[in-house]
Image: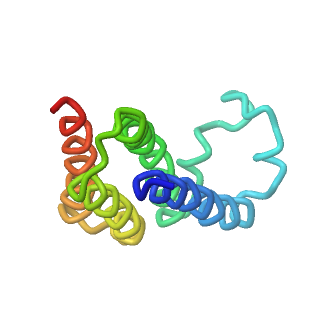
Amino acid sequence: MAVELQVLVLAALLQMVQFLLVSIPANLQLGSGKFMSPRDPERLGKPLQDQLHPITGRLFRAFNNHFEGLILFTIAVVAVVLGDKSTGLTEACAHIYLIARLIYIPAYAQGLSPWRSLIWLVGFGATGVMLVSTLF
């Protein structure tokens, strides 16, 4: 299996871990009734993430942010692997993306500004390099 695909699987597993980091404390804080409901705005009063402890809310936003980054990273990995464009550079970029995502979670949870944004930019940039490298 291509290194980039292995890292993609690890990134997907990280997303699952992030789900647990959010869902367990959120259920403890708000009760499972809110999460098992249809989540209609008039029933909840305000969005669930706004009702959470600030750190849990940050973990929720980091979780959603990873979905956004994971879409582009997945496209980059598919383009690299199917285009037979895997190189040491694309492998390194895949690892950089994953490491940035790992570091991003505690940085966001702790509210480290502007560091969390810079960490995000590193992962985003690595994904961009992977995408551009498939064109040459």
Q: Residue at x 70, y 65 (%)?
A: 24
Q: How far from the left and from the top, in percent, is residue 5?
A: 47, 51
Question: Count the marks: how many?
Answer: 0
Q: Position of residue 46 (x, y in %)?
A: 59, 38
**Residue in the image at 79% along x and 32% along y:** 38
Quadrant in which the C terminus is drawn? top left
Closer-to-camera residue (73/25)? 73
How was this image coloured? rainbow
Residue 44 lies left or right of residue 52; in this view the side is right
Q: Is residue 45 left or right of residue 59?
A: right
Camera-side residue of 5 and 41? 5
- x 49%, y 45%: residue: 64
Which of the two residues, 72 or 49, is positioned nearer the viewer here?
72
Q: What x and y, as percent, mark residue 77?
A: 39, 42
Identity of the residue drawn at 19% across and 29% down: 135
Tell which residue pokes out farthest to the front in this image: 84
Q: Residue 97 location in percent, x, y?
A: 32, 57
Please give left or right for residue 135 compared with residue 19 in the image: left
